[in-house]
Image (cartoon, rainbow, N blue to C red):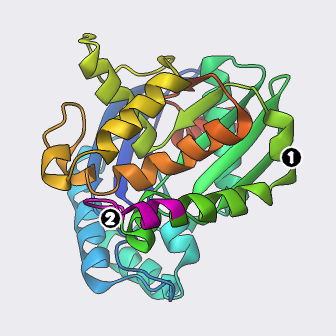
Amino acid sequence: MQNLAIVDLGSNSVRLAVNELRDDGTYREVNRVKADSRLSEGMGPEKILQPKAMERTIAALRSFRPYYEQLPQLIVRGIATAAVRQARNRDEFLAQVKRATNIDLEVLTGDQEAYYDYLGAVNRLKVKDCLLLDTGGASCELVHVKDGRDANLISVPFGAVNLSEQFHLDDRVAAVDLFSAQVFLRERLRDIWWLNDAKHLPLVLLGGANRTLARMNRQQQKILHVENIHGYRLTTDQVMRTFQRLLAVPLRERKRISGLETERADIILGGMLPLVTLLQMLDSDRVVFSESGVREGIISEYLSQR
């Protein structure tokens, strides 16, 4: 039996998943830890990782070490996604991480991230036809799943943090800013020609903003075990009502909404906007949430290769 620790450095948070890999090809998660570090904060159009954001992230990585460093037959795999992928100073940051934690971070390409999302979600949800959307802090991954296969995939460089910063969606939202954000998203998404093939299909949702959407609705419906969102479904009308509810209140009131993490309240509108736009463009009537994504996809690939 081996232990695989996956350190997943996202644009808004850092996550650790520790899994026991059994000899029969199955695995069991034994620990999961999350820290909010918002690495992509303040990158701006220059795409420069900021010193304070880098310090927060490295501190989070250090805090993870007691959860895995004493485990036998240990494999540590570190991955980084959009914020590091886009950063002009990424080599400097990767060197700092290596010195501080001894972790060699692998910077996933956008296509790799989307493919691992596909592997992780489809293996667990058993969906045949859908559009998969993973909304992160600085990117969105889109995969058209047809007959259970990844027909097309892409990563686009906008997400909850950079949309919120660019279009001032953090507190009270001005009509002109919301309109500008919607025009921006529609123009970028229309450039993805194969999205037309996903019309009327359900959307399978991954990523922090989408998990938050699920938790808010489960709290509102008074469902036990709010965190158990895998396979949870919402209609498009329910998604739109939640978005309108968030849009109608300032940040201080948003922070009090049950199921919405305080540290995510200022980026939730930016995080939901890609989903809202896609639901309108594709005339989809429902969404399905997946708790499995990149990390589970990496485990699946590792087990199949082993």
Q: Give the amino acid type for the residue marked by disc 1 in the picture.
A: Trp
Q: Is residue 31 above or below residue 261?
A: above
Which badge, 1 or 2, is on the more N-terminal residue? Answer: 2
User: Residue visible at 36% across and 61% down?
Assistant: 169
| Residue range highlighted in magenta | 169-179
Number of numbered markers: 2
Q: Is residue 43 left or right of residue 115?
A: left
Q: Is residue 255 left or right of residue 71?
A: left
Q: CA distance from mark 1 to mark 2?
A: 32 Å
Q: Is residue 272 above or below residue 303?
A: below
Q: Give the amino acid type for the residue marked by disc 2 in the picture.
A: Arg
Give the quadrant of residue 155: bottom right
Residue 174 in magenta? yes
Question: Residue 28, position in %: x, y?
Answer: 44, 23
Question: Residue 237, position in %: x, y?
Answer: 50, 24
User: Residue visible at 45% across and 23% down?
Assistant: 238
Q: Which mark is residue 38?
A: 2
Residue 254 in magenta? no
Q: Is residue 65 above or below residue 254?
A: below
Taking the image as drawn, is residue 25 in sight? no
Give the quadrant of residue 95: bottom left
**In the rendered view of the protein, which quadrant contains the C terminus?**
top right
Question: Residue 214, position in %: x, y?
Answer: 39, 28
Q: Nearer the viewer, mark 1 or mark 2?
A: 1
Q: Which mark is residue 194?
A: 1
Q: Residues within 10 Å of mark 2 (few under 14, many from 20)?
A: many
Give the quadrant of residue 120: top right
